[in-house]
Image (spheres, rainbow, N blue to C red):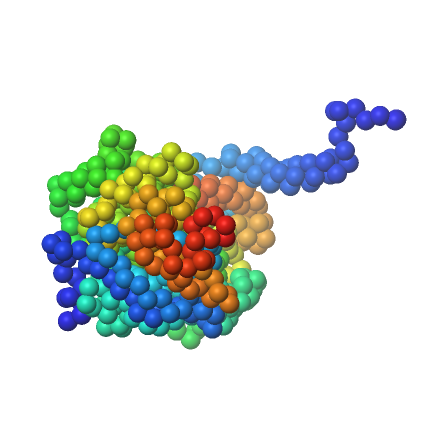
């Protein structure tokens, strides 16, 4: 074949497309599989009743509540800490300062630590040392440690992405550093904060290993933050690995987890947009 | 004591400024050294000279924006009226309220047009809605922006054109009623028509504010300036070569370098 026709696809183009398509295909396959097996089990009753017979029958109400509580504890602790640290890193240290580099390097290492290590740490520190036992509180705090690096680094990027002109402009108007930070830089950095939040929530909500050692796997309805609570991810793990005949409910729980993840992400983005729009107007 | 002297905002007489052997160092490198020059009250002083000769650095010393840049050292003296401002007891924030800056690149905040002006006002204690609305309207009229934006005050300022953004930034500085305005090449990022509009606006500030403007545009300096100062790099350090009235600098310069520069032979 001497001449190339215009429609002929070159080999590199084909490979790039093939890779992109196969990645998408894997995602679609997982999603399809979960939908196929799980959607039949899903009902209002499934969401609002307690599990029976080790989870083979009944629903996931206490597990949903526990998951949300663990996530709430995690975010309540990690959000303010991460924004504070990000402000320190981005606004009060230069990129080349020794302190800043040390903190950043530590965070990057921390972000790569396997979650089971966080689990063992949480167990040793929160459950045993601080005497919180197997509880939602221990679990949430452990998850907070785990997502902190992601939240801090993306929040820092968010602050660094705010143009220097805003800071100079604010200073030239005689605005204090605190005012500039709260009323100008924080709103301007919100997109970065939201990206970090979405990533952090994603990692926290899907976490299993770190929670087995800290929040435990009691599937009763929790009565306080000091009660043990089983998260959705542990429930899925338990049903598919330890409970014969639990597959159907495991699929349904996985579907709920996916929907929850999409909902939380959507909400985070929506709230941020709503907040930004208000900031611009009033 | 210093602070109360600085915050009094009497519009009866505009302040003059005077620098005395002023030098600025970035680390060990000098940006400019030994600049002694007056800045007369209510007049427009134009700083001219080639790039990198320290004009902008000089400007940012005048309201201590240099404080924000790490590793800078300012030596010498700057007096605003009779008060030495290079004094740690002087509140830089209060100083910047009296001495405002307009930057080369228009930098409206990512807020609505209205909030761009209301935000600094609110932070400086003006919170009543009617008062805010009145001040914002007068200032926007002052910079000739009111008729262009009055129907979209609550939309984002980032959608304005370059010239409109720069006029908004001037309005944002004026709304705080400063006494001195420092302008750092305010027209250089604008198209010729917007540039003309902004230039007319600056000329109209004469007598109402003490103005210092950095410009690369000699014709502009000649059109709007009362006084001019030529900066030049000598041995990698910015120096003040000649200072005088615009008339004198452009028609009867004392220095050969000035003559060469204003006639377009050097630079």
Q: Residue B51, percent across and down?
A: 47, 55
Q: Residue at x 46, y 45 (%)?
A: A261
Splitting the image into 4 quarters, where does residue A86 fall?
bottom left
Q: Nearer the viewer, residue B212 or B220?
A: B220
Q: Is residue B103 left or right of residue B153?
A: right
Q: Nearer the viewer, residue B127 or A114?
A: B127
Q: Nearer the viewer, residue B198 or A171?
A: B198
The answer to whether residue A55 of the structure is visible from this angle is: yes
Q: Residue at x 21, y 52 (%)?
A: B42
Check the image and report above or below for B3 versus A8.
below
Q: Residue B111, percent across and down?
A: 31, 43
Q: Is residue A201 left or right of residue A273?
A: right
Q: Is residue A4 left or right of residue B124?
A: right
Q: Residue furthest right?
A: A1
Q: Residue A242, percent across and down?
A: 57, 54
The tally of labels here is 0
The answer to whether residue A193 of the structure is visible from this angle is: no
Location of the N terminus of chain B by quadrant is: bottom left
Check the image and report above or below for A28 versus B81.
above
Check the image and report above or below for A207 versus B167.
below
Q: Residue at x 43, y 50 (%)?
A: B262
Q: Residue at x 77, y 27 (%)?
A: A8
Q: Is residue B66 left or right of residue B175?
A: right
Splitting the image into 4 quarters, where does residue B192 fall?
top left
Q: Residue B18, percent across and down?
A: 26, 64
């Amino acid at each position: 074949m001497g001449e190339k026709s215009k429609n002929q696809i070159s080999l590199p183009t084909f490979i790039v497309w093939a890779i992109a398509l196969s990645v998408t295909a894997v995602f679609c396959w997982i999603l399809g599989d979960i939908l196929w097996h799980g959607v039949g089990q899903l009902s209002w009753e499934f969401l609002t009743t307690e599990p029976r017979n080790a989870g083979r029958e009944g629903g996931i109400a206490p597990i949903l509540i526990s998951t949300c509580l663990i996530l709430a504890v995690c975010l309540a602790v990690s959000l303010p800490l991460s924004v504070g640290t990000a402000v320190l890193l981005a606004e009060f240290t230069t990129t080349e300062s020794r302190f800043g580099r040390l903190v950043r390097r530590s965070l990057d290492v921390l972000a790569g630590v396997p979650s089971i290590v966080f689990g063992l740490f949480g167990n040793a520190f929160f459950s045993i040392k601080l005497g919180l036992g197997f509880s939602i509180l221990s679990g949430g705090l452990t998850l907070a440690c785990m997502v902190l690096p992601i939240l801090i680094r993306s929040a820092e990027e968010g602050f660094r992405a705010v143009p220097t002109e805003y800071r100079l402009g604010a200073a030239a108007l005689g605005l204090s550093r605190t005012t500039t930070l709260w009323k100008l830089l924080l709103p301007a950095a919100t997109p970065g904060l939201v990206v970090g939040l979405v990533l952090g929530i994603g990692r926290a909500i899907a976490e299993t290993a770190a929670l087995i050692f800290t929040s435990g796997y009691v599937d009763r309805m929790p009565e306080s933050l000091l009660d043990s609570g089983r998260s959705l991810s542990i429930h899925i793990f338990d049903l598919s690995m330890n409970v014969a005949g639990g597959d159907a409910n495991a699929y349904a729980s996985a579907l709920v987890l996916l929907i929850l993840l999409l909902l939380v992400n959507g909400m985070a983005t929506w709230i941020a947009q709503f907040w930004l729009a208000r900031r611009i107007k009033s | 004591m210093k602070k109360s002297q600085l915050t009094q905002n009497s519009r009866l007489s505009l302040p003059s400024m005077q620098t005395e052997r002023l030098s600025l160092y970035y680390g060990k490198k000098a940006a400019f050294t030994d600049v002694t020059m007056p800045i007369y009250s209510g007049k427009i002083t134009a700083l001219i000279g080639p790039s990198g000769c320290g004009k902008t650095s000089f400007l940012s010393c005048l309201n201590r924006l240099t404080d924000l840049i790490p590793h800078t050292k300012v030596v010498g003296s700057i007096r605003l009226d009779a008060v030495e401002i290079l004094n740690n007891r002087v509140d830089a924030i209060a100083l910047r309220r009296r001495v405002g800056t307009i930057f080369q690149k228009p930098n409206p905040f990512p807020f609505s047009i209205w909030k761009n002006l209301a935000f600094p006002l609110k932070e400086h204690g003006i919170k009543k809605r009617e008062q805010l609305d009145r001040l914002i309207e007068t200032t926007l009229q002052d910079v000739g922006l009111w008729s262009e934006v009055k129907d979209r005050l609550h939309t984002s300022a980032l959608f304005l054109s370059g010239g409109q953004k720069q006029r908004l930034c001037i309005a944002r500085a004026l709304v705080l009623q400063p006494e001195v305005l420092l302008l750092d090449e305010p027209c250089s990022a604008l198209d010729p028509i917007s540039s003309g509009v902004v230039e007319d606006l600056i000329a109209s500030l004469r007598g109402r504010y003490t103005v210092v403007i950095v410009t690369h545009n000699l014709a502009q300096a000649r059109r709007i300036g009362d006084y001019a100062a030529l900066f030049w790099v000598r041995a990698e350090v910015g120096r003040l070569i000649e200072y005088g009235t615009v008339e004198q600098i452009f028609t009867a310069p004392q220095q050969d370098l000035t003559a060469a520069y204003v006639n377009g032979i050097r630079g």
